[in-house]
Amino acid sequence: MAQVNKRILIVDEEKDVGGTFETILENYGFDIDYFTDPDMALEKFKPNLYDLTILDIKMPKINGFELYDQLKSRDSNIKTLFITALSSVESYNTQNSKVYPLKGYRHFMAKPVSRRELLEQVYSMIN
């Protein structure tokens, strides 16, 4: 079940969540770059390197949608899985009117995310 040469970028300021995702995915053979700071993730980002990005929606400085737009402008083929503690994207839009409108096809998962849910979603998006 392990993947070879599949790289995932994870950006989540919550170390316990992002670190757990990192550990789970590394245990299944994925190469992971994990950042708690969206600015650092942008600084280190290289186009055509990642098979998938996993972004938390609600982060300080740059929210997940804004980060997605910046990453997408650098790599138009990027696939993104959004993670949110809120039950729906509409809830987030209601709370933060500065979020960019949804653009294109995206995937969302509500926290807490089980190991099985994470792996199923990652495998379906990468394959």
Image: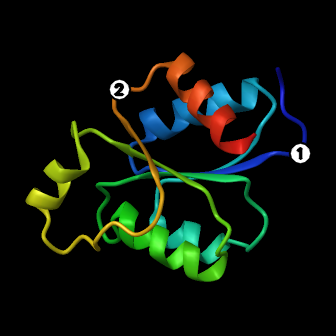
Residue 110 locus on image (x, y percent): 33, 34
Label annotation for residue 64: none
Q: Which residue is mark 1?
A: 5
- Which of the marked residues, 2 or 1, is nearer the chain's N terminus? 1
Residue 50 position (above or below residue 99)? above
Q: Is residue 91 left or right of residue 23?
A: left
Q: Measured from the top left, where is residue 102 in percent x and y? A: 33, 66
Residue 104 vertical placement versus 12 (above, below)? below
Identified by mark 1, the residue type is: Asn
Task: Please state which of residues 35 and 91 is positioned toward the viewer in this rendering.
Answer: 91
Residue placed furthest toward the bottom: 73
Tell me the quarter of the image containing the N terminus.
Answer: top right
Q: How many marks?
A: 2
Q: Which mark is residue 112?
A: 2
Which residue sits at x=25%, y=50%? 89
| Residue located 29% across and 74% down the image | 100
Which residue type carries mark 2?
Pro
The scheme the figure's colours follow is rainbow
Side of 127 where 82 appears, left or right: left
- In percent of width and height, residue 74 lies at 64, 81
Q: Are marks 2 and 1 in contact (CB under 8 Å)?
A: no
Task: Label 1: state its secondary structure.
Answer: loop
Depth check: give the residue in front, 97 or 28: 97
Q: Residues within 10 Å of mark 2 (few under 14, many from 20)?
A: few
Query: Where does the image place residue 93, in percent across and percent down from the top left?
Result: 17, 60
In this view, 91 is above or below 62: above
